[in-house]
Amino acid sequence: MGKLITLIFILFLGLIAYFAVLNRETVTVLVTNNLAYEIPKIALVLISATAGALLMLIIYTIRDTRRLIDNIQAQKRQKKQEKVQALYSRSLGAIYAGKTEVATDALKDILKEDPMNVQALLRLGELALKEKDNKQALDYFKRALSSDPENVETLLSLVKVKELMDEHEEALTYIDEILENDPQNITALYRKREILERLARWDDLIYLQKGIIKQSNDENEQQMLVGYKYEYGRESLEAGELEKAKKAFRNVIKLDKDFIPAHLGLAEVMVQEENTEEAINYLEKTYRQYKFMIVLARLEDLLLNIGEPSRLIRLYKDSLAEKPSDNVLKFFLAKLYYRLEMLDDALEIIQGIENPAAFPEIAKIKGGIYLKRGQAEKAVEEFGSALNLKMTLRIPYCCLKCGHTFEQWTGRCSSCGRWNTYYFNIHKTCRATDAERE
């Protein structure tokens, strides 16, 4: 390569010498109006060529220097990234191993290299949450947000810490920021739903749930919408807004005719409107159509309150005529007879129940009958078999989905959150006890 350049240079000098022989004329070069020089033409060519060469040399020198600087900086950045990645890997390993202090030190070393490293800030925030230091976690998450304002993971982390601090409205603000950029972010929609449930904002939940259903037309999501509409009606009923409650309950029944809480809610609206007879007629019609025992129990309370037990007994007998082997109906009729002091009738019905051991409350009823008849020994025997029961003639309820038991009926299970699942805990309806679930 060096010989080739030397050869080219010699040829160039020879060419210049050749042109110098042929062009011996001089050229006048004016420097100023009063200053001029006469130089050979070939000298002017050499000067121009030299100036061009120097200019190109300067340009290439600047370019190569810039490349050198960029390469040095790129190498530094690469080394920095490798160091940060090594520290981050070490911190994750420590987190998984439960070595919180080691993880914290590694993450803080990352911040020394890169003070706005989002992942390091998020992991430090999570470690702070683990230590119950919500304020420190909030500080880390806010620093991460300032580094990347639209980072979904950061916004969800802020939602979490705000919930832990019972600042639900601010948590909703961060969720809305996510949904503003991505209205179909299903994780954000679910988190918003959880918060709105805690705040009991049923009207907002109905609107939100409709949006979720558009993305996931799942049967469970449809049932959630029905449940929220029921809760809106229940809240309206408790607030005395009877028209709103009535409309809500009717909408629920249109969506799900088997939704017992809505039927009971609609009847309660009628009672509060002082239309007790209308409520009774509605519940009787509902029971005859769907055979809901919960509805029959509420109907029993209303009819006894207005002093019409005969109507109730007739309803029980009509049902038994349709299902003569229904032991649950027999049990409830026996309980009704006992409440009405119709002891012989109660005992007769009890004797017709198959497998009475499946109905522990029968022992209390029989014990009460024998006690009222003065048969103390038999009463003691029956009461002895019912010692494990807490309340006389009070039948607990249980959730058909999770087995949770409760003394009072509600439209929604407080354990699993499902609606329309409570039933009388009789005849081994709920086998799962709280102790078994724990």
Image (spheres, rainbow, N blue to C red):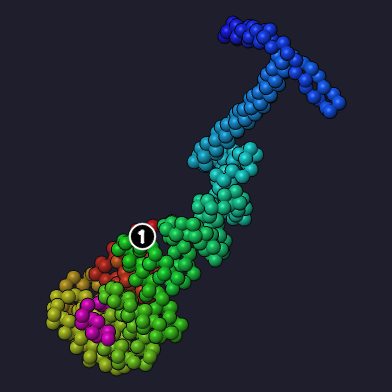
**Residue at left 77%, top 20%?**
28
**Residue at left 29%, top 76%?**
254
Work out whether 21 lies above or below 111.
Answer: above
Work out whether 289 lies above or below 195.
Answer: below
Whether residue 377 is visible here, answered yes or no, is no
Which image quarter: residue 324?
A: bottom left
Which image quarter: residue 244?
A: bottom left
Left/right of residue 361 with respect to residue 109 in the rendered view: left
Q: Nearer the viewer, residue 99 or 260?
A: 260
Left/right of residue 414 with respect to residue 253 in the rendered view: right
Q: Position of residue 299 (x, y in %)?
A: 28, 85
Q: Residues within 10 Å of mark 1 (few under 14, many from 20)?
A: few
Q: Give the residue type that dot 1 points to.
A: Gln
Assess whether residue 228 is covered by the magenta stretch: no
Left/right of residue 337 with respect to residue 8 in the rendered view: left
Q: Which residues are magenta?
A: 282-294
Q: Position of residue 431 (x, y in %)?
A: 28, 63
Q: Main SS type for the magenta part?
A: helix
Which image quarter: residue 39?
A: top right
Residue corresponding to mark 1: 215
Left/right of residue 33 with respect to residue 188 in the rendered view: right
- Numbered circles on residues, count: 1
Q: Residue furthest front?
A: 25
Work out whether 391 lies above or below 156.
Answer: below
* Element on which disc 1 rests: helix
**Residue at left 85%, top 24%?**
35
